[in-house]
Image (tube, helix red, strand yellow):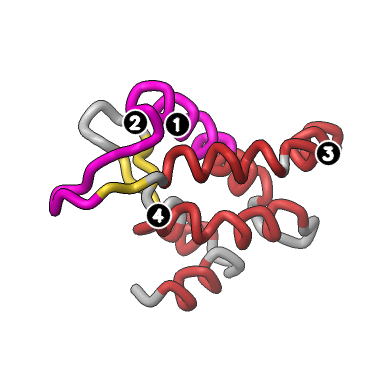
Amino acid sequence: MDDAVEAVTLFTSSRASRAAAVPGPHTARGPEGALDVYPRTLAGLPLLFSMAGDPATPDRAAVVTLLLSIGREAVERTDFHDGIVHGLDGSESTAYSDTVALMRERGEVFVSYAQDP
């Protein structure tokens, strides 16, 4: 699915469509059920933060939960892989450590999410 269409799907009123779009191709569950974080995940974080910050976002709590899951997994994988992972093609990625850095830069918004009724 095209990334722009997929992003719009997150705003649809259909719960089933939103559920199908999250986590989408930006993240996937690995063999142990862990959330994998890809460079595309990192690229999508600004949109997810925007959605989480907008009270009009349908299932806003699910978006915040997804952000927390991505951040948690990135921290765990950064510790395990020293921040660098190798793709199947041998390419190196710093998606985990870059995701952790972005999440830490926006730490104050998580406090605001926790205070939101």
Q: Residues within 10 Å of mark 2 (few under 14, many from 20)?
A: few
Lower position in the chain sequence, tag 3 or tag 1: 1
Residue at 52% across, 69% down = 7
Report the amino acid beneath label 4. Pro
Marks 2 and 1: in contact by CB < 8 Å? yes
Q: Amino acid at mark 1?
A: Glu
Total numbered labels: 4
Badge 1, how many Cα within 10 Å: few under 14, some, many 20+? some
Q: Nearer the viewer, residue 16 or 100?
A: 100
Mark 2: which secondary structure? loop
Q: Which residues are magenta?
A: 68-91
Residue 77 position in % (x across, y down): 39, 29
Q: CA distance from mark 4 to mark 2?
A: 16 Å
Secondary structure type for disc 3? helix
- Tell me, yes or no, whether the highlighted magenta stretch contains residue 88: yes
- Find the distance from the CA under tag 3 to the CA under tag 4: 26 Å
- Crowd class of label 4 (few under 14; some 14 to 19; many from 20; radius 10 Å): some
| Residue bearing mark 3 | 112
Mark 4 or 2, nearer chain start: 2
Q: Is residue 22 above or below residue 30?
A: below
Q: Which residue is mark 1?
A: 73
Q: Which residue is mark 4?
A: 39
Judged left or right of residue 63, residue 30 is left
Q: Eyeballing the image, is 14 above or below 33?
A: below
Residue 15: image location, x then y, percent: 53, 58
In front: mark 1 or mark 2? 1
Q: Which mark is residue 87?
A: none
Eye-nearest disc, 4 or 2: 4
- Spatial separation of the CA atoms under disc 2 and disc 3: 27 Å
Q: Residue at x 30, y 30 (%)?
A: 33
Look at mark 2 in the image and give the residue it sits on.
34
